[in-house]
């Protein structure tokens, strides 16, 4: 019993001695650690700047919603877009059954369920796209 008490006291003193000495960087050399810190600082600096997002090349109209007060909302590319807002560089004008995209000196019309190639103006319906995917 006296022996286990003595070992416990000795272990406590050894732990206190070890705690008094800082370990420093255990897994990396100072040069490796400096490289890691520099990489983190560069990443945080890049996170502060806004990323460059490429403009979409197509627009897909899922539907048009009209509220009780007459305001219209179009679902373009899975996002709600209000009348008069811009989408992919075009001003959006929402009608009863279609959306007009106005910009770049031209006007493109899009109906619900269609996908529009913004460069060529070619429209494709959901039925055509589904048929092509089945092939």
Image (tube, rainbow, N blue to C red):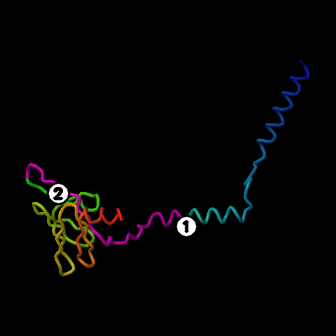
- The part of the chain drawn in magenta is 42-69
Q: Residue furthest bottom?
A: 105
Q: Name the residue at 59% across, 65% down.
A: 39
Label 1 with label 2: CB-CB less than 8 Å? no
Q: What percent of the width, then of the height, locates residue 112? A: 19, 61
Residue 3 highlighted magenta (yes or no): no
Residue 5 sits in which quadrant?
Answer: top right
Q: Position of residue 15 (x, y in %)?
A: 80, 37
Q: Quadrant of residue 33?
A: bottom right
Q: Residue at x 27, y 70 (%)?
A: 88
Report if residue 63 lies within the magenta region. Answer: yes
Q: Which mark is residue 42?
A: 1
Residue 38: x and y in percent read 61, 66
User: Few, some or many C-alpha atoms within 10 Å of disc 2 (few <14, some 14-19, many ≥20)?
Assistant: many
Which of pointers 1 and 2 lies earlier in the amino acid sequence?
A: 1
Residue at image x 21%, y 80%?
104
Left or right side of 49 for 113: left
Which residue is more in the foreground, 63 or 103?
Answer: 63
Numbered mark located on residue 64 in the image: 2
């Amino acid at each position: 019993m006296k022996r286990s008490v003595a070992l416990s006291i000795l272990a406590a003193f050894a732990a206190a001695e070890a705690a008094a000495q800082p370990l420093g960087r255990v897994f990396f050399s100072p040069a490796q650690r400096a490289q890691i810190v520099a990489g983190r600082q560069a990443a945080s600096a890049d996170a502060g700047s806004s990323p460059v997002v490429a403009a979409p090349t197509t627009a897909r109209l899922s539907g048009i919603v009209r509220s009780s007060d007459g305001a219209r909302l179009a679902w373009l590319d899975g996002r709600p877009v209000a009348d008069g807002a811009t989408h992919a560089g075009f001003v959006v004008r929402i009608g009863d059954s279609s959306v007009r995209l106005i910009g770049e000196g031209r006007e493109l019309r899009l109906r619900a369920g269609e996908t529009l190639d913004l460069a060529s103006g070619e429209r494709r319906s959901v039925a055509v796209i589904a048929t092509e995917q089945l092939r």
